[in-house]
């Protein structure tokens, strides 16, 4: 009951919060940062150390934090007095038994999916959980709270974090991605969701069932989360459900962005501050450094994400002052590194360019994986076109030539790499770490 009320309050607060100008937004952000620091700094030794002798007003000069740093300094970073060992023990126990009730001192502990090999951990208090639920509802419910929506939310074991919302006018059911499709189907047929939220790879599976006439759902909105949305999948999902696909851009580190009514992704600058580390000339692609204005238990202040974002050219017709994105272009870890044709350096090829090369080489390709196994080796998996391999490999070689990189050896894989149901789908993946490359792209 207390949870529902807090969630409702956050929902209402979020619905009212609209900014008329960038100035107004930035003023709000500054005010919230001061409030955040007042609450975080006294209880977080590590944050205090990052400040050193800097005054709070100069918070944008404190050293940037990343995932390894967060894990290393976890005990002294969080304000809940929780050690990394006990947090991992509780979270692993919950994953093993798939019983997500256990908490530590009222704080939910969760593991992130750890696609990059190193599992992350997050802490969320009751208050933060309700805020998360309230804001996500405020941003994503097309018809408001009273329309009696029934929401089916497919996620990898998220536990308590995702089970909060159950009011009389809203049903919110959590589906564990690890469950069998059969079980999903029978639950879906019982719930008849009006809103469907899940990773694109799952939504594609459901789209097939819809197309085959096995599944009929009265959905008014379909929302993609958790994985990079590939235009190939977008097309399949949009045509099966007959509507614009919406997106929630969310990571362990927070609720980062959401689509507006036009289906354009906007960063949640009303919840976080995004500093931009440009990796491309002309204010193009950038890596976001985020500061979450409302996370106290595990403070996220000047934290570098692993994502590459592509800003949208020109304003969005919805008129929002929140920064509009063209897309999330994969993860820094998946940027291909090809040895330069001349000299000892590397040529960086963004996932987006790889994907374009593959898809445009042969229109019949329905699905693909491209994995860079080593500096000179690329492995391809292709579905839908038996004859596509020569054309696709030629396109990749041309890409290497255009970028003055040594041409890689390209092999056709025997089928697709196996993936557990709870693993994120990555179509473009770099499977090695170049020696000279450490930390962020520079
Ligand atoms: Zn918009």
Image (cartoon, rainbow, N blue to C red):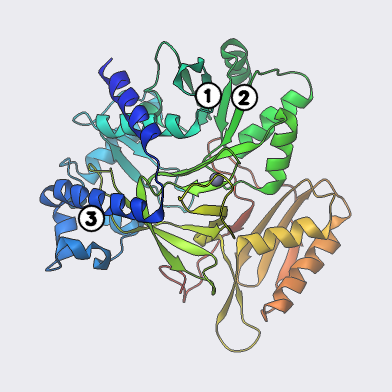
Please name the residue shown 23% across and 41% down the image. Answer: 297
Q: Residues within 10 Å of mark 2 (few under 14, many from 20)?
A: some
State if disc 1 and disc 2 touch (CB < 8 Å).
yes
- Element at label 1: loop
In percent of width and height, residue 112 lies at: 41, 43
Please name the residue shown 69% across and 42% down the image. Answer: 233
Q: Which dot marks residue 143?
A: 1
In percent of width and height, residue 268 lies at: 42, 46
400, above or below 42, in the image: below
Quarter of the view holding residue 224: top right
Viewer-proximal residue among 177 and 126: 126
Q: Nearer the viewer, mark 2 or mark 1?
A: 1
Query: On the rendered structure, is 333 left or right of 263?
Result: left
Q: Which residue is mark 3?
A: 73
Q: Which dot marks residue 220?
A: 2
Q: Earlier in the sequence, mark 2 or mark 3?
A: 3
In percent of width and height, residue 221 lies at: 60, 28
State if disc 1 and disc 3 touch (CB < 8 Å).
no
71, above or below 440, in the image: above
């Amino acid at each position: 009951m207390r949870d529902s009320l807090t969630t409702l309050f956050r929902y209402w607060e979020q619905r009212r919060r609209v900014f008329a100008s960038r100035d107004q937004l930035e003023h709000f952000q500054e005010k919230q940062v001061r409030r955040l620091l007042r609450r975080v700094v006294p209880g977080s030794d590590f944050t205090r150390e990052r400040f050193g002798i800097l005054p709070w007003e100069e918070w944008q000069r404190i050293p940037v934090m990343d995932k390894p740093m967060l894990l290393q300094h976890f005990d002294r970073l969080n304000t809940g007095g929780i050690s990394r060992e006990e947090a991992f023990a509780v979270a692993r126990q919950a994953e093993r038994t798939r019983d997500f009730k256990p908490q530590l001192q009222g704080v939910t502990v969760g593991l992130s999916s750890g696609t990059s090999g190193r599992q992350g951990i997050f802490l969320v208090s009751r208050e933060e959980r309700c805020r998360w639920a309230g804001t996500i509802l405020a941003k994503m419910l097309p018809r408001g709270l009273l329309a009696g929506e029934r929401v089916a939310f497919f996620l990898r074991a998220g536990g308590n974090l995702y089970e909060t919302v159950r009011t009389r006018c809203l049903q919110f059911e959590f589906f564990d991605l690890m469950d069998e499709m059969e079980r999903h189907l029978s639950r879906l047929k019982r719930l008849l969701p009006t809103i469907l939220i899940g990773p694109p790879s799952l939504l594609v599976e459901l789209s097939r069932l819809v197309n085959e006439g096995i599944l009929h759902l009265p959905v008014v909105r379909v929302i993609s989360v958790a994985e990079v949305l590939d235009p190939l999948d977008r097309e399949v999902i949009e045509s099966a459900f007959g509507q614009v696909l919406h997106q929630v851009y969310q990571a362990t580190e927070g609720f980062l962005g959401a689509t507006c009514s036009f289906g354009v992704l906007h960063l949640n600058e009303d919840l976080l501050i995004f500093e931009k580390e440009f990796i491309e000339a002309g204010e193009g692609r950038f890596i976001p450094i985020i500061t979450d204005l409302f996370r106290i238990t595990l403070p996220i202040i000047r934290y570098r994400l692993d994502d590459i974002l592509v800003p949208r050219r020109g304003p969005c017709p919805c008129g929002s002052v929140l920064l509009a994105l063209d897309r999330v272009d994969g993860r820094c870890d998946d940027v291909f590194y090809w040895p330069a044709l001349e000299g000892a350096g590397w040529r960086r090829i963004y996932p987006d360019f790889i994907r374009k090369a593959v898809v445009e080489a042969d229109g019949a390709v329905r699905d693909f994986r491209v994995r860079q196994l080593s500096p000179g080796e690329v492995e391809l998996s292709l579905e839908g076109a038996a004859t596509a391999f020569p054309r696709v490999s030629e396109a990749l070689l041309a890409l290497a030539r255009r970028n003055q990189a040594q041409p890689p050896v390209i092999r056709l894989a025997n089928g697709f790499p196996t993936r557990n149901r709870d693993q994120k789908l990555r179509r473009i993946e770099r499977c090695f770490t170049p020696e000279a490359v450490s930390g962020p792209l520079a």
